Each structure stands twice: as C-alpha cells, then as structure tokens.
Image: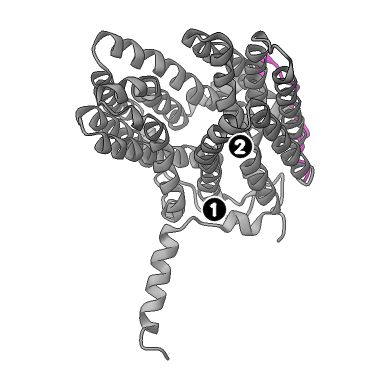
C-alpha cells in the first residue's frame, strides 16, 4: 500500500465536499439534455443582450432610447410570467418549452433581417425586446416546474447549483464574445449566431420526454392564477423567500450606478470588471457548491445569504479602492447565488406539482421586478447624493429589511427540508443512464 494511501480518502472527501454535485447529470437523461440546451441558448442570448443596446445606440445616439428597453420589457414579463405559470400547470411543459424556444429563434431571425436592411429600423428593436420578454415569461415557469419531475428530491439542491452554473457560464462568456464579434464582424453575426443556438437547443429539446399536465388540471385562468397566489400567501416560508429576494434586489442592486462609481473612483477601465464581478462570484460558488446538498435549513440559508449580499454591497460603497470594490462585488454575487440555491430548493421540495407552474410565475416577479425598480432607486439616490452613498446606503437598508422580514416571518427561519427521498415526484420517473 502506498505510504499516503491513508490520507487519500479524506482528501477525496474534502474535494467532493466542494466540487459541484453531478448526481442530477449522471442519473437523469432529461436533465442532461436541458442543461446542455440551456448552456447553448444562454450563451447565444447574451450575444443579443449586448447587440440590441449597441444597435440602438448606433441608430439613435440616445442614452434614454437605450434605457427604454427595460421599460418595454417589464410589463410583458410580469403579465406573461403569471400567465406562463398557469400554462405550465395546464399544458405539457415540454411542449411549452419547445414552442417558446423556437419562437425566440424566429424573433432573433427577424432582428437579423432588420440589421441587413440598408437602413435598419428602430421600432422593430423595441418590439423584439417586448416580445422576447413575453416569451421568456411564458417559458421560465415551465423550465422551473419541470425540474422536480426529472430529478429526485434529494438532488434538487444539486440541480439548482448546476443550473446556476450553466447560467453563469453564459453570463461571463456571452458578453465577452459578443464584444469581439460585434467589434470585428458586426451586429448581424451576433444575431445570426444567436439564431443558430436557438435552433440547436430546440433540436435537443425534442429529445425530452413528455411532461403532461395532471389529468384534472384546469385551463389557465385568472382564477387559477389567484389560487396560486393564495397558496403562496398561506405558505409563509415561501412568502418569505419572495419578499426577501424582492427587498434585496430593490435596495441593493447596483447595476445602474456602476458607470458613475467607476468614474468616481477615477477608474473607467474597471467598468467591465464591475459588471462581471458579481457573475464571477456566483460562478465560484457554483463551482464549489457540493456543500449545498447537505444543507437542510434552507430558510436560514436564504436569510443569511441575503444579509451577506447587502453587507458586501455596503462594503463596496464604503471603500475607495477599486480592487477592493471589485472584490466585494464578487462576494455579493456569491451570496446572491447561495440565496438563489436555497430559494430554488425550498420551492421544489415543497410546492405541489399541480401548482409549480403558477408559483414559478409568481417567483418570476420577485427576481424581475426587484432589479428593475432597484435601478430606479439606486439611480435616484445617486443623483441626490453620490454613487458610493447610494451603494452603501442600499446595502445597509437591505440588511435591515432582511432582518425585519426574518423577524416577522418566523416560519422562514424555522423551515427545515423534509426527509430525503431518492424518488422523483409520482408524475414522472427519472430517466435511466
């Protein structure tokens, strides 16, 4: 026996405690297909995410015109997010995912055609942004609600971490590649590449197994949406996750003031790094997320992580050293990822299958409305005071709001995961290797 053999097993256990838990990837063929498809389409979507405002800037030269993209996206996301949740409970979730994925590909194709015109039009860019937001609202609840059907309950936290890793890879690589493609090849190549990624992801999605609605599912209606809202209201631990995420994003979301922060620190070169720092922190958590599968008190996990997000944001505002700012923004992104894993695990562990779509639609509101309104708050405070003051005051307010919500919603702190089960929900079986 080699002399260091006795130490090998503990070292292996320590590594596995940090590395992502790949059990969902190994045990579920459908999860693998969705993960690969998501990596591809997410990367392509970030190409368009960068290309659209760049094209608007080139065509109008107006910062207000570029900022208006967020305004035209918000209402469709809210309305169709709620309706998409009802659809996810009433229709085959696989069909809904495939239909919206294909529609997104056609929409990007329309952007490409507009770009190839001798004189590209402005209004199609706003229409495309609004329709894309509506399609995302229709699709996201089905994507969230299908996971507990294809992944065993004891692997839900691992699945949440792997899905987050998929998103972060696109969030970092997509914009970086988009900048190079747009600068050296042109906007048309960015849109064209995105259209190809949607086509590939749709083809991969055809391999998913059907995910039909329950036999007694009701057609989508306002009454059904209200039923989901009532369920969320009476489940105070779930209500707490929505409220804490909304408060954290509303009070401490820094994106709108980062250009002013970089200028105030006399480091305009750091702006791109500031935007990427949060995603880098989230990616590091995803890459070392093995420990999350052993957490059972997910309510405390959400509360502490949201408070950590606010504290790290406040620290970024207190310091005047740009590299320290970048470090704290990365730490904030890591805490945000921990909170997201905890929230996702709580939802998937406890929400009945017949309500998952509608509750996912409500959850969509918490993480879409919060950042949008958060940019308004941070920009308004910065206009009256300064970027740094807006940053640290928002972080402090976030910590206070999280503490208040935790005190008023004791069921959130008391939440503990149910006994582990190695079986998926009764409606679906895990796909074999």
Q: Residue furthest bottom?
A: 1
Q: Is residue 178 above or below residue 422?
A: above
Quadrant holding the C terminus: bottom right
Quadrant holding the N terminus: bottom left
Is residue 91 shown left or right of residue 320?
Answer: right
Is residue 377 shown left or right of residue 204?
Answer: left
- Front residue of 354 and 52: 52
- Front residue of 429 and 182: 182
- Front residue of 219 and 328: 328
Magenta residues, as a range? Answer: 209-224
**Front of the two marks 2 and 1:** 2
Q: Main secondary structure of the magenta part?
A: loop
Q: Which mark is residue 42?
A: 2
Helix, strand or loop for disc 2: helix
Q: Which mark is residue 154?
A: 1
Is residue 341 shown left or right of residue 147?
Answer: left
Q: Residue at x 41, y 50 (%)?
A: 295
Residue 74: % across, % down: 55, 15
Q: Which mark is residue 194?
A: none
Q: Residue at x 51, y 37 (%)?
A: 176
Helix, strand or loop for disc 1: helix
Q: Residue at x 71, y 51 (%)?
A: 429
Say if residue 85 shows up in the picture.
no
- Front residue of 257 and 226: 257
* Residue 298 position by quadrant: top left
Labels 2 and 1: the sequence-earlier one:
2
Q: Is residue 347 above or below residue 226?
A: below
């Amino acid at each position: 026996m080699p002399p260091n053999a006795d130490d090998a097993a503990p070292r292996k256990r320590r590594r596995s405690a940090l590395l992502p838990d790949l059990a969902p990837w190994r045990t579920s063929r459908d999860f693998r297909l969705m993960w690969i498809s998501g990596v591809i389409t997410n990367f392509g979507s970030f190409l368009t995410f960068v290309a659209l405002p760049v094209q608007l800037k080139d065509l109008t030269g107006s910062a207000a015109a570029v900022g208006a993209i967020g305004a035209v996206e918000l209402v469709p996301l809210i309305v169709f997010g709620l309706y998409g949740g009802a659809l996810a409970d009433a229709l085959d979730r696989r069909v809904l995912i495939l239909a919206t994925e294909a529609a997104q590909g056609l929409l990007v194709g329309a952007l490409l055609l507009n770009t190839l015109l001798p004189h590209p039009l402005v209004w199609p860019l706003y229409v495309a942004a609004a329709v894309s937001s509506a399609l995302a609202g229709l699709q996201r609840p089905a994507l969230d609600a299908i996971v507990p059907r294809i992944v065993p309950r004891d692997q839900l936290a691992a699945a949440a971490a792997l899905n987050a890793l998929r998103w972060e890879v696109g969030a970092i690589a997509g914009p970086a590649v988009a900048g190079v493609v747009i600068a050296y090849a042109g906007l048309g190549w960015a849109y064209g590449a995105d259209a190809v990624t949607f086509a590939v992801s749709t083809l991969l999605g055809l391999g998913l197994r059907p995910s039909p609605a329950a036999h007694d599912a009701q057609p989508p209606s306002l009454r059904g949406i209200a039923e989901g809202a009532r369920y969320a209201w009476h489940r105070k631990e779930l209500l707490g996750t929505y409220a804490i995420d909304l408060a954290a994003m509303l009070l401490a979301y820094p994106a709108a003031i980062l250009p002013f922060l970089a200028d105030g620190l006399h480091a305009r070169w750091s702006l791109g790094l500031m935007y990427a720092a949060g995603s880098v922190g989230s990616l590091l958590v995803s890459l070392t997320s093995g420990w999350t599968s052993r957490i059972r008190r997910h309510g405390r996990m959400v509360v502490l992580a949201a408070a950590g997000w606010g504290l790290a944001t406040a620290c970024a505002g207190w310091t005047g050293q740009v590299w320290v700012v970048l470090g704290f923004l990365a730490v904030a992104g890591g805490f945000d990822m921990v909170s997201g894993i905890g929230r996702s695990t709580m939802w998937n562990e406890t929400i009945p299958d017949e309500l998952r779509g509608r509750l996912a639609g409500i959850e969509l509101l918490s993480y879409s409305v919060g950042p949008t309104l958060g940019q308004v708050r941070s920009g308004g405070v910065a206009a009256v005071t300064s970027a740094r003051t807006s940053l640290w005051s928002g972080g402090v307010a976030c910590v206070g709001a999280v503490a208040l919500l935790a005190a008023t919603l004791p069921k959130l702190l008391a939440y503990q995961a149910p006994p582990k089960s190695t079986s998926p929900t009764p409606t679906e079986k895990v796909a074999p290797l």
